[in-house]
Image: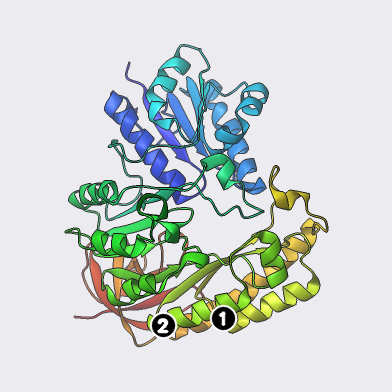
Amino acid sequence: MTEKVKVVTLGCEKNLVDSEIMSGLVHERGYSLVNDKEEATVIIVNTCGFIDAAKEESVNTILDLAELKQTANLKALIVSGCLTQRYKEELMKEMPEIDGIVGTGDFHNINDIVDQALVGRKPVMVGNPVFNYEQKLPRRMATPRYTAYVKIAEGCDNACTFCSIPIMRGKFRSRSIESILDEVAQLASQGVREISLIAQDSTNYGTDLYDTFMLPELMNRVSAVPGIEWVRLHYAYPGFFTDELIDVIANNPKVCKYVDMPLQHSEDSILKRMRRPGRQRDARELIRKIRDRIPGVSLRTSIIVGFPGETEEDFENLKSFIREMKFDRLGVFTYSKEEDTPASRLPDQVPDDVKEYRSNVLMELQREIANERNGERIGQVIDVLIEKYDGHNDVYVGRSQYDAPEIDGEVFVGGGQLKIGEIAKVRITHSFEFDLSGEVVA
């Protein structure tokens, strides 16, 4: 009997790319890929191990799926990803429900892991976290056919004191431009129109391979691939945001006017303890420069509240900074005390209830700001990538270049017959806290 495999992805888009590669390898092997967990004989859970909440979600997902061995058709439960890279011994010792594990640098061997697990061997393949993305591997996309993520680098060298990514993903290493362009061309030939370039530290791209910042050239070359209409950039580390990069975003019509740049905090004392680049004045100057030179840009950032030593004064200053900067999009995370990170050993850890309160306060503040920023789009004609049709309300639903997949807002579009995956011109007529609505421009 042909095995039926379901791949479950937890965590970030970088994990999703790895899952798509594993799906491609499994499909190439001759196994059937299924969406229904009840139907699956093999389930691969690609885990996240970044913060406590993600680890808890991963463990709970593994336990929930393991029950399918009694209630459905499941024969082998494989666990991959960051959690296995970091906790392989603990997982195999404490979770007998797991039939095999594979780390972040070894998932190209997923078929061997599945085969061994199916005969009861409980394989463990967790070695160096470095994966070779230069090799040409099959990939079965889990995203809609018109949009895809492309990894341009893996790992990180920045050594932020709160972050465990280097432990799980290794040192920073760029892919060659040629391998990235080959992958983008292949995706474009399948109908992909939007490419989101992702890395833990995308702005540092190329410094290890080419001894210089190559992201601007890469973005221009990706945009030149026939069929690609939008190129979107994620996780732009502020310390390496060059003037040349600003120029590319401003002047290349296919590059989305969208900057996802995690700042993590505003206060110099906190930034220093986080071991983040620059200080508040540097962030202010960079934001001013980006907005001056990229008219209409949508600026997303992420903030960590409750970092060790964050005082009430620090938090009030952070609120003032956010109120003044008026980010279009904002993600707020409560500090997670990750073992084996320098920040976990810092004094003055902030109580959980204080972290939660501060997170809620910032999100309420951002609601007001997002509503205000969205209101400024009324009357504008913008490009919208159509993603679905809502028959109940007789509207199409899509995203503008100012909204990334999954994490940002939507645009509700009326007044015309459209196709899923097309990019339509839409005049914005109404704004909401996070979304927009408008009419197709004939």
Classify the position of the N terminus by image quarter.
top left
Q: Which mark is residue 369?
A: none
Quadrant in the rendering for residue 391: bottom left
In the picture shown, does residue 107 fall above or below 49?
A: above
On the image, the x and y values in percent for residue 368 come to 58, 80
Count of number-bearing discs: 2
Quadrant in the rendering for residue 203: bottom left
Q: Amino acid at mark 2?
A: His
Mark 1 and mark 2: Cα distance apart in space: 23 Å
Residue 390 in view, yes or no: no
Q: Amino acid at mark 1?
A: Met
Q: Residue at x 39, y 44 (%)?
A: 17
Residue 273 in view, yes or no: yes
In the picture shown, does residue 238 fall above or below 442?
A: above
Q: Compare marks 1 and 2 and give the one earlier in the sequence.
A: 1
On the image, the x and y values in percent for residue 92 come to 61, 23
Q: Observer-nearest residue: 42 or 184?
A: 184
Is 83 situated left or right of 42 in this image?
A: right
Q: Residue at x 43, y 75 (%)?
A: 298
Is 92 situated left or right of 169 in this image?
A: right
Helix, strand or loop status at disc 2: strand
Label 1 neighbour load within 10 Å: few <14, some 14-19, many 20+: some
Is 159 situated left or right of 42 in this image?
A: right
On the image, the x and y values in percent for residue 126 come to 52, 27
* Of marks 1 and 2, the one in the foreground: 1
Look at mark 1 in the image and give the residue it sits on. Answer: 325
The colour scheme is rainbow
On the image, the x and y values in percent for residue 132 come to 38, 37
Helix, strand or loop status at disc 1: helix
Look at mark 2 in the image and give the residue it sits on. Answer: 430
Q: Residue furthest front?
A: 211
